[in-house]
Amino acid sequence: MLYIHKTACISPQQTHPEADLNRLMASKNNMLQITEPVYADIPPGVLRRMGKAVRLSVGAALPLLKNGPAPDGIIIGTANGGIEDCIKFLNQIIEYNEGLLTPGNFVQSTSNAPAAQIALITKNKKYNCTHTHRGLAFENALLDAIMQLEENVENSYLVGSVDEISAYNFNIDRLAGCFREAVISNDKLFETPVAGTIAGEGCFMMTVSGKAAGAEARVVALLTIHSTDENLVRNTLEQFLHQTGFSENAPDLLISGENGDSRLQKYYDAAESLFPETASIARFKHLSGEYCTASSFGFWLGTEILRTGKIPGIVLKREGSRRIERILIYNCFRGLQHGMILLESIIHTR
Amino acid sequence: MSRIMITGMGIISAIGNSVAENRDSLKNKRGGISRLEFYPTAYAGKLPCGEIKISSETFREKLFTHPDSAITRTGLLVLHAAEEAVKDSGLTPDQLAFRDTALVGATTVGGMCLTDELFRDAHERNYGSPYTSSYDYASVTLAAQQRFGITGEISTINTACSSSANAILYGARLIKRGYAKRVIVGGADSLAKFTINGFNALNILSSGLCAPFDRNRNGLNLGEGSAFLVLEREEDVKGKKIYAVLSGFGNSNDAYHPSSISPEGEGPYLSMKEALERAKLKADEISYINAHGTGTENNDETESVAMQRLFGTPPPFASTKSFTGHTLGASGAIEAVYSVLGLMHQEIYPSLQFSEPILSTGLIPLHDYRQQAVRHVMSNSFGFGGNCTTLIFSKP
Amino acid sequence: METAELKQRVKEQIIKFLNLTTVKPENIRDEEPLFGEGLGLDSIDSIELIVMLSREYGINIQDPKEGRKVLVNVNTMVDYIEKNRTK
C-alpha cells in the first residue's frame, strides 16, 4: 500500500503553492503553459543552469523534502526530460557544424537531470530512477514506489513527474497530428470532438510512505496496458476493478483523461460505461493540457478531491450522488497506452 | 520469494551480432572500436567508435515487414537483440501476449540518432518527416511491444549510462512483487551526433582507443549496441536451460556533481555494497567484476577507489568497454550478458589497451582471457547525474 | 579596445554565457577568483568559458591545463585575450 503525504503540483492552473480551481486559466495558441513561480529554495548558482523541467521538478520537490526525513528514493517519470535543452544543444550542433559547443545544454537535457538535481541538492544517495515510457512514465514511477514499499513498509519516497512544452516539441507533436489544427480555447475543449487536442505541461511531486500515519489518501492499486482495442481495455478495467474488490462498490468518482480528441473517445466511453449513474465523472485535460505525464495532474486532482471532499465545478462532467471515498483515474495516451490508478481516502475509512 | 533466473539472451555490438559472436571476440581479444564508416558526422576520422558495421537499411530488410514503419536505428537494434533473446528463451507467442509478460527497455538516445531529421521537424512548419513520433525514448521499447504484442507492464528507463542495468533491476522487481511472471529486459543505443557532440563538448572522448584503468587514459570511445535478457521465476523454468541467477542488485546516487563521480567513489561504493547485501554475499565471494571502466580520468580513478574501499584487494576485474566502446543506455545490459556468459562457460574476460596502472591506486585489470571457477559476477554501471547501479549474477 | 572597456565586456559575457542572472558586472572584482572561492564556478563552466573565448575572440585553447591558467580571474582572462585574440 502506498500512502500519500505531501503533494505539490505546478501547472498552467492555480495549483501551487495553494490550489484555487475556481477560475480556469486560458490556453493560448492551443498551449496551456505554466507561469513559473519564484524559486526561493533553489540557490541562484544552481538555478542558473537549469532548464525548465529541472527548475519545475526541483522547485516542486524541495519544499516537500524540507523538514522531513530524507526519502529512501527519488523516482521520477518524464517522457521527454529537458527537451528544450535538448533541442538547444541540437541547434548548436547544426549552427556550429559540430564544432566547439557548450556542454551545459547537453548535461541539462538528459532525462535523469530532474531526479539527479533533486538528489544533488538534498545530498540524497539513495535509490534514484527515471522512467520515460511516454504516456505511462508517471504510472511507472508510481509502480516502482509501490513495489519498493511492498518490500519495505518502513520506507518513504519522493515520486513525481514532469514534462515541459517547448516550441520545438510542440511543433514536432503538431506535425505528428496530436493537436487541433484550428486554435481553440481550452474551455471549449470538449465541445466538438475532432482529431487533436491541446498541449500542456506540468510537474507533480509527492512524498509517499508505507504507513498511514499523517497521510490522507492511499493508492490501492495500479495497472497499465498497451492496446488499441477498446473492448480489451474495457475488460481489463473491469477485471482490475473486480480484483481490487470494487465490483460491488464501483469507485465513487472516475477522473477521466478525456481530452477532446475524437479518436480517443471510444476508450473514455468504455471506461465511463463501467460507472453507474450514482458515481461522478470528472475530467481535467482542459486544465492541464495534454502531455505524456498529464495523468499526474489527474492524480493530484484526485488527492485534492479526497482532501477537500468536494469536486470543483470546473472539472465536473457528471455529478453522482455518492460521497467521494474511492477514485479511479483512467488515462489513455494516443490510443495505445492506458493507465489505471485506484485512489482511496483514509480519512473516512480509518 | 522466488529467485530470478535468466533463460534467454540476445545481443548486438561492435564485436558481434549475436551472443556467440560476442563471446568469440571477448575470448580472442578482438576489439570493435574503429573509424566510423556509416554514421555521418564531422568526427568520423577523429573519434573512433564501437560502430556496428551494418547499415540501418540492412537492418530494416532483415527485421522488417513494414517498410513504412518509422523505426529508428536504435529501435532496430532493440528488435535485433530482443528477437534473439526471446527465441533463445523459447517463449511462445501466447506467452508473449499474456498480461503477465512484462517488457522493460532503456536508452539514452532513443530516436534522436536521427539528429538532422529531428532538427528539421523541430523547425519545419508544414511537413513532418515519418519520424515525428519516433524521437522519444519510449519509441524504441514500443517497437518491441508491437513486435511481440506485449500487453503486460512496460517501462523505458533513462538514467544515462546505468539505464539498462536499472531496466534489469526494475524487471526483476516486477517479478519479485508479482506484477509479472517473466520479463524481457534490456536496452539499446545507436551512435548519434547528439551524444558524440555532447560528450565531446565535455572533453571526455578519446581520439585514440580507450584505455580503461590505464595511467595515461584520456577519455572514452562511444559505441552502439543492444542487449536483452529474459528473466523468469524459478518455479516456472523447469526443463528450461538456466544461464544464471540474478542474485543481487543495488542502486544509489553519488549526489556530488552532474557529470562526474566523487573522489571517494561514494555512489559506486554504495551500489556495490547494497548489491552484496541483497545477494547475501561477502565481498570476497565475488569471482570477477565487469567494471564500468569508461576510460575517463574521473570514472576509472573513482571506481578504483570505490572497489578498494569495498574489497580491499578487488577480485579480477576488467572493462569490456575496451572492446565495444561505451554503449551508454545499452551498456548495463550488454555487460550483463557478458557477465552471464562468464558464469555459463566458467571464464573471465580481459580489458584491452591497458599498459600501466593508475598511480594513486595501483590496480591492474585482467588483461588476458582466462578459464577459471566463476561463481558470482558483479557488473557495474555508473552514469551522469550520479546514477550508480550494480548487478550480481550467480551460477544457478 | 581599452583594457578597462574589455574587462567590462568580459564580465558581461561571463554573466551572459553562464546565465548568472543574479550577478551584475560591478559585483565581479577583477582579481576575484572565478573558480572555487569567489564566483564559485565549476568544471562545466570552465568548458563554457573556453567556448566563449573561441566564439567571441577567436582564441582556441586545446589544453585544459592552459585553460586553468587563463581562467583564474578577469585580469588573467583579459590579459590573455589582449595577447591572443584573432577577432
Image (cartoon, grey):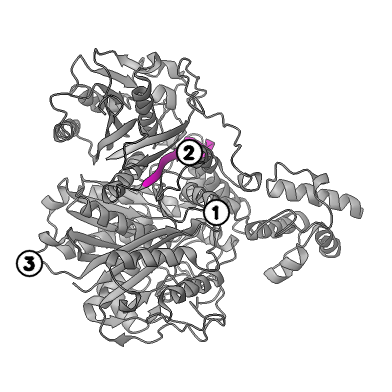
Q: Chain of mark 2?
A: A
Q: Looking at the image, is B327 positioned above or below residue A148? A: below
Q: How many marks?
A: 3
Q: Is residue B31 magenta?
A: no
Q: Chain of mark 3?
A: B
Q: Specify few, some or many for label 2: CA neighbours under 10 Å numbering under 14, 14-19, or 20 or more.
A: some
Residue at 52%, 42% in the rendered image: A58
Q: CA distance from mark 1 to mark 2?
A: 25 Å
- Could you say which disc has been placed on residue A107 in the image? 1
For discs 3 and 2, the disc positioned in front in the rendered view: 2
The amino acid pointed to by label 3 is Gly
Q: Position of residue B229 (x, y in %)?
A: 25, 62
- Could you say which disc has been placed on residue B157 in the image? none
Residue at 24%, 72% in the rendered image: B394
Q: Position of residue B12 (x, y in %)?
A: 32, 67
Q: Secondary structure at mark 1?
A: helix
The residue lying toward the viewer, choosing from A208 and B167, is: A208
The amino acid pointed to by label 2 is Leu
